[in-house]
């Protein structure tokens, strides 16, 4: 047996034979006679139409198998296939470089991808892999290839683009291994959404794997064991059985109340990015939405979504759970989420620059449109509006003043809205945590955003692997800030929740409940395990544990203590 180390991208264990994905063959002719340009263009247009049809089918199939949010990528690809600037580059290659349709598409996709990849934004860099994916699809269609592929076993590939994964029969693929990619690449996100164990970023080790090699993919630790001995195989088979039992147990708590043993209700909600995610929120047994990241409605657009479009999206989310609390966060753009139509000024430190509420207060027309849309949608359910990145009382008061102005306009125009919409803030900047008692007087609720609270408290970029050792929500200063915020909110009689990644970590659950948080918002998959843990807690005990943990000196001391505590839980 030998081992390959990679990145743990999707948890779980898979055992099976290796099957390598076949890469498309690029043996088309690149140059054609100038007189053939019209015919090459016709071939390109026909391929474009066929690609649109394929993408429509993929979008529908992915929505059914993996949910609306995963399917969105194909809606975006459909737009990109017909995007005038892409088409212009392709036609230019045919007209001016005597390129065949295949060569023109490949070159155009590579050029545009290189441009995206060079931009200083993770979001735009991801668009580079989208445009390459579109190029591959068009070339395959031009060469008469089909989209259907059948692989059975553990799939090994250089990278898995969205269309590769969507064309697979996922019932036959037990695991993924890729040479490229990281935790947030498309392949990883799709593997997690489909619940398939995956190890990515194994590099050139992929080439050492032969078709038919028997492997264990350990998606928990990011390891691939190649041709393991029988006793190791038996060990892992046992682990798979335990995981299956655990999944069955968690499925059984799905719709039970999220209550501690002594009857305290801890609200469990989900984080969403589009209205299409609501199906998953309901299926997860969550009680509402604790964070709707509205920037996703803006990111794929070339101009600001209109007030009407926004009203529709917000209403769709509210109407999916009309009696439940739905927390919609106003636009958190800027930083690493640059929009083409606002902001975008060069900044030395974008994460410390014009981001979220700061950007919205500069582009007040865009912000007011969103606030009007939110108020108009409020009639459809139980809306809570949340402002991101608040650091000062003045920022909060300015945002509230603009909300008031939006409400006054609607009144004057005779447009209905709810006048008692709850207003809260994300506590994700240490400044806000430090003055939580003052801010609490001005809000109905707090939601702690640990992703940014960790980044700004520890002065460690959340995307920078060199300082990953600091990016830990169990760092004592972060835990203490959470405690301070919870205390301030409780004193003011306001509820305090959490929507950062920490909320979905069952190891943290006893601590967060003990510190006084009453709402936790997470991705749908985390809901059953956190709920199961809550159902085994006793509030008084959690408060004692939290007091004790607040005095610990290091993140590893805190984790060790929480691991000891976790030993007494069934899962
Ligand atoms: C956070 O910062 O914890 C948060 C939930 O917001 P985002 O991850 O969208 O910045
Ligand atoms: Mg944040």
Image (spheres, rainbow, N blue to C red):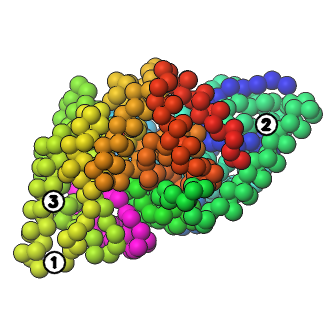
The residue that mark 3 highlights is 403
The circle drawn on residue 216 is: 2
Instruction: Confirm or reject: label 3 Cβ below 8 Å from ligand 2.
Output: no
Question: How many angstroms separate mark 2 from mark 3 (CA)?
Answer: 55 Å
- State the residue in front, 479 or 287: 479
Residue 8 horizontal side relative to residue 173, left or right: left
* Residue at the right extreme, as displayed: 230
What residue sits 41% from the left and 73% below the top?
Answer: 323
Does 457 sit above or below residue 433? above
The residue range painted magenta reads 303-330
From the viewer's side, name the closer residue of 523 and 562: 562
Q: What separation in Å lies between label 1 and label 2 (alpha carbons)?
A: 60 Å
From the viewer's perspective, is residue 116 above or below residue 379? above
Left or right: where 273 falls relative to 526: left
User: Tag 1's secondary structure?
Assistant: loop
Q: Residue 445's spot in the image, x, y percent?
A: 31, 53
Whether label 1 touches label 2, CB < 8 Å: no
Q: Secondary structure at mark 2?
A: strand
Does label 2 or label 3 sit earlier along the sequence? 2
Q: Residue at x 50, y 36 (%)?
A: 546
């Amino acid at each position: 047996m030998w081992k390959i180390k990679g990145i743990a991208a999707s948890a779980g264990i898979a055992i099976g034979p290796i099957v390598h994905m076949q890469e498309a063959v690029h043996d088309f002719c690149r140059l054609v006679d100038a007189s053939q340009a019209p015919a090459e263009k016709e071939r390109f247009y026909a391929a474009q139409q066929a690609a649109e049809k394929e993408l429509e089918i993929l979008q529908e199939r992915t929505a059914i198998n993996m949910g609306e949010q995963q399917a969105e990528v194909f809606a975006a690809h459909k737009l990109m296939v017909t995007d005038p600037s892409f088409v212009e580059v392709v036609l230019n290659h045919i007209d001016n470089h005597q390129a065949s349709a295949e060569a023109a598409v490949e070159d155009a996709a590579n050029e545009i991808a290189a441009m995206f990849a060079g931009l200083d934004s993770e979001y735009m860099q991801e668009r580079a892999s989208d445009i390459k994916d579109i190029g591959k699809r068009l070339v395959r269609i031009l060469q008469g290839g089909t989209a259907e592929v059948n692989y059975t076993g553990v799939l090994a590939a250089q990278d898995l683009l969205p269309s590769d994964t969507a064309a697979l029969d996922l019932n036959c693929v037990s695991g993924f291994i890729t040479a490229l990619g990281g935790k947030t690449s498309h392949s990883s996100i799709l593997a997690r959404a489909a619940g398939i164990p995956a190890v990515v970023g194994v590099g050139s080790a992929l080439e050492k794997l032969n078709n038919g090699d028997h492997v264990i993919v350990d998606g928990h630790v990011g390891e691939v064991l190649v041709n393991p001995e029988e006793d190791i195989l038996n060990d892992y088979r046992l682990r798979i059985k335990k995981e299956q039992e655990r999944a069955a147990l968690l499925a059984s708590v799905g719709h039970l109340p999220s209550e501690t043993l002594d009857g305290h209700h801890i609200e469990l909600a989900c984080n969403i990015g589009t209205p299409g995610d609501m199906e998953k929120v309901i299926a997860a047994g969550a009680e509402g939405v604790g964070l709707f990241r509205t920037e996703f409605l803006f990111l794929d657009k070339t101009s600001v979504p209109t007030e009407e479009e926004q009203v529709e999206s917000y209403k769709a989310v509210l109407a999916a759970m009309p009696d439940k609390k739905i927390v919609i966060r106003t636009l958190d753009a800027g930083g690493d989420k640059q929009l083409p139509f606002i902001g975008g000024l060069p900044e030395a430190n974008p994460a410390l620059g014009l981001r979220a509420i700061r950007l919205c207060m500069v582009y007040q027309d865009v912000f007011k449109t969103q606030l009007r849309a939110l108020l108009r949608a409020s009639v459809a359910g139980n809306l809570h509006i949340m402002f991101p990145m608040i650091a000062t009382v003045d920022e909060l008061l300015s945002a509230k003043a603009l909300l008031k102005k939006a409400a006054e306009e609607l009144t004057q125009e005779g447009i209905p809205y709810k006048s008692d919409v709850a207003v809260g803030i994300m506590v994700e900047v240490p400044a806000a945590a430090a003055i939580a008692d003052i801010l609490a007087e001005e809000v109905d609720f707090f939601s702690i955003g640990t992703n940014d609270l960790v980044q700004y408290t520890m002065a460690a970029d959340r995307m920078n692997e060199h300082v990953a050792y600091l990016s830990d929500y169990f760092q004592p200063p972060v835990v203490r800030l959470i405690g301070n915020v919870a205390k301030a909110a409780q004193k003011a009689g306001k509820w305090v929740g959490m929507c950062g990644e920490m909320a979905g970590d069952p190891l943290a659950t006893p601590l967060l409940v003990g510190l006084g948080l009453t709402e936790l918002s997470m991705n749908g998959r985390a809901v059953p395990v956190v709920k199961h843990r809550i159902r085994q807690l006793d509030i008084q005990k959690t408060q004692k544990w939290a007091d004790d943990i607040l005095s610990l000196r290091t993140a590893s001391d805190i984790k060790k203590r929480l691991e000891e505590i976790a030993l007494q839980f069934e899962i």
